[in-house]
């Protein structure tokens, strides 16, 4: 019973994170600012790298993980 409850909780947590990531990428692609712990991110100054799920600065070597950003 514990194993089933853990599996359901784990799947719910992953689905929640995936939907948040999709919404953040949509906002980024539409040119909106995204608030992250390191600062604001926009497609004017950053590129999105889908392999690492992070934003990479066009000028500096700044890399911001998408998990550190909020909707």
Image (cartoon, rainbow, N blue to C red):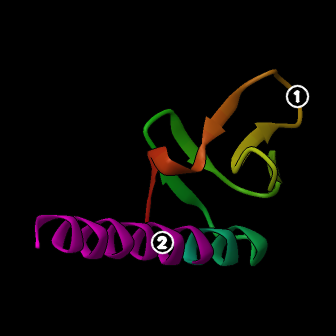
Q: Nearer the viewer, residue 68 or 14?
A: 14
Q: Residue at x 79, y 58 (%)?
A: 43
Quadrant for the C terminus, please. Answer: bottom left
Q: Quadrant of residue 27?
A: bottom right
Q: Residue furthest right?
A: 58
Q: Is residue 59 above or below residue 53?
A: above
Q: Quadrant of residue 23?
A: bottom right
Q: Is residue 3 left or right of residue 69?
A: left
Q: Residue at x 11, y 65 (%)?
A: 2
Sequence-earlier tag: 2 or 1: 2
Q: What residue did someone put label 2 on?
A: 20
Q: CA distance from mark 2 to mark 1?
A: 27 Å
Q: Is residue 70 above or below residue 47?
A: below
Q: Position of residue 29 (x, y in %)?
A: 77, 73
Q: Residue furthest front?
A: 1
Tag 2 secondary structure: helix
Q: Residue furthest left?
A: 1
Residue 59, disc: 1
Q: Nearer the viewer, residue 3 or 51?
A: 3
Q: Residue at x 11, y 73 (%)?
A: 1
Query: Total of numbered circles in the picture?
Result: 2
Q: Position of residue 46 (x, y in %)?
A: 79, 46
Q: Quadrant of residue 24?
A: bottom right
- Which is the main secondary structure of the residues drawn in magenta? helix
Residue 45, disc: none
Q: Is residue 34 left or right of residue 27?
A: left
Tag 1 secondary structure: loop
Q: Which residues are magenta?
A: 1-22
Which mark's residue is nearer the viewer, 2 or 1?
A: 2
Q: Position of residue 49 (x, y in %)?
A: 82, 50
Q: Position of residue 59 (x, y in %)?
A: 88, 28
Q: Is residue 68 above or below residue 48?
A: above
């Amino acid at each position: 019973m514990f194993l089933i409850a853990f599996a359901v909780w784990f799947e719910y947590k992953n689905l929640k994170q995936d939907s948040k990531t999709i919404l953040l990428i949509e906002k980024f692609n539409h040119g909106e600012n995204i608030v992250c712990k390191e600062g604001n991110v926009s497609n004017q100054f950053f590129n999105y790298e889908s392999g690492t799920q992070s934003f990479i600065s066009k000028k500096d070597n700044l890399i911001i993980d998408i998990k550190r950003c909020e909707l």
